[in-house]
Image: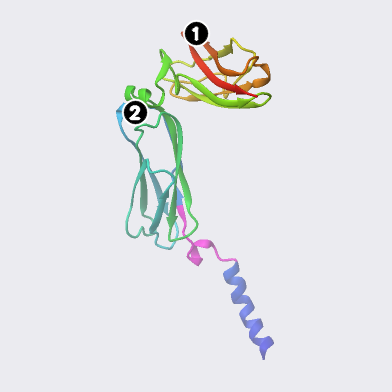
Amino acid sequence: MQMAIEKKLLPIFLLFLFLPATVLGKTDASWTAIDHDFGLIKETDGPKKVEFKFYNKGRKDIRITDVRPSCGCTAINYTEGKIKKGETGSVTITFDPEERPGKFRKTVAIYLNDENPIELSIQGTVMASPETLKLFFPNGSGNIRFDTDTLRFGELKRGLKRREFIDIYNAGSNPVSPHFNSDSNALIFELSQPEIPPGETATLTVYLDSRNVMWLGDKMLKISGSWKEGGIEIPVTMTLTP
């Protein structure tokens, strides 16, 4: 008897196993795009928005049940209620560039019918306003700005090494390739990228090797930076201890 029942149920099981997802009721949304590049935008132009659309090509109604942005700098608006078969829904992402200079990439997880989310992404580069430059990159020469006017290593025992970082921002309209050197062989430099595009940042890593500093006590070294349109000098302070 049990074997007879199993034989009857087997064809039904196989039927469901090979049915298309749309028949089984799985959400079937077709997106026109899932990423957008704003390119180079000005902070002073204010928020930027983009609309992502999707089409319900399945048999099951679709509802956007949750949205989860990766950053508070994005506002999300989306189609509410049911999106029936053949209808179109949308998600609009608005990015606020205020006090966010440089490159960015933000994501938003979209949940349809509480199923696994699809990730929408936006990216671009923000040209900082004069106010933001003063706040985040107060030191500089011309369009090349630095986040500090003095690099401080603090106390360092003789024989040890330490590294510190300087962020550099290109506020100009052309790429720039800065070069750095020092009046002391105790300092070594490493730039995160040889060329800094407009609106983007780079990080200068400065390595200090105390074995190449002669005398104990407070020291003042110097970083010299140069590029096609200008240059800068940044003091380096440290206290060498036994």
Whether 147 is drawn above or below 232: the answer is below
Across and down, in percent, residue 13 comes to 60, 74
- Report the magenta residues as a range: 18-29
Q: Are marks 1 and 2 in contact (CB under 8 Å)?
A: no
Observer-nearest residue: 15 or 133? 133
Which residue is painted at 30% across and 28% down in the image? 45
**Which secondary structure lies at badge 1?**
loop
Q: Residues within 10 Å of mark 1 (few under 14, many from 20)?
A: few
The label on residue 43 is: 2
Observer-nearest residue: 234 or 94? 234
Which part of the image, by quadrant, shows the C terminus? top right
Instruction: Judge left or right: residue 216 versus residue 175.
Output: right
Which residue is painted at 49% across and 15% down in the image? 234
Whether 19 is drawn above or below 190: the answer is below
Across and down, in percent, residue 22 comes to 49, 62
Answer with the quarter of the image where residue 106 lies: top left
Q: Amino acid at mark 1?
A: Lys
Observer-nearest residue: 92 or 206? 206
The label on residue 228 is: 1
Observer-nearest residue: 86 or 66? 66
Choose the circle earlier in sequence order: 1 or 2: 2
Residue 161 seen in render: yes
Whether 179 is drawn above or below 100: the answer is above
Q: Amino acid at mark 2?
A: Glu
**Which secondary structure lies at badge 2?**
helix
Q: Residues within 10 Å of mark 2 (few under 14, many from 20)?
A: many
Q: Residue furthest top?
A: 229
Which residue is painted at 36% across and 57% down in the image? 83
Across and down, in percent, residue 216 comes to 62, 18
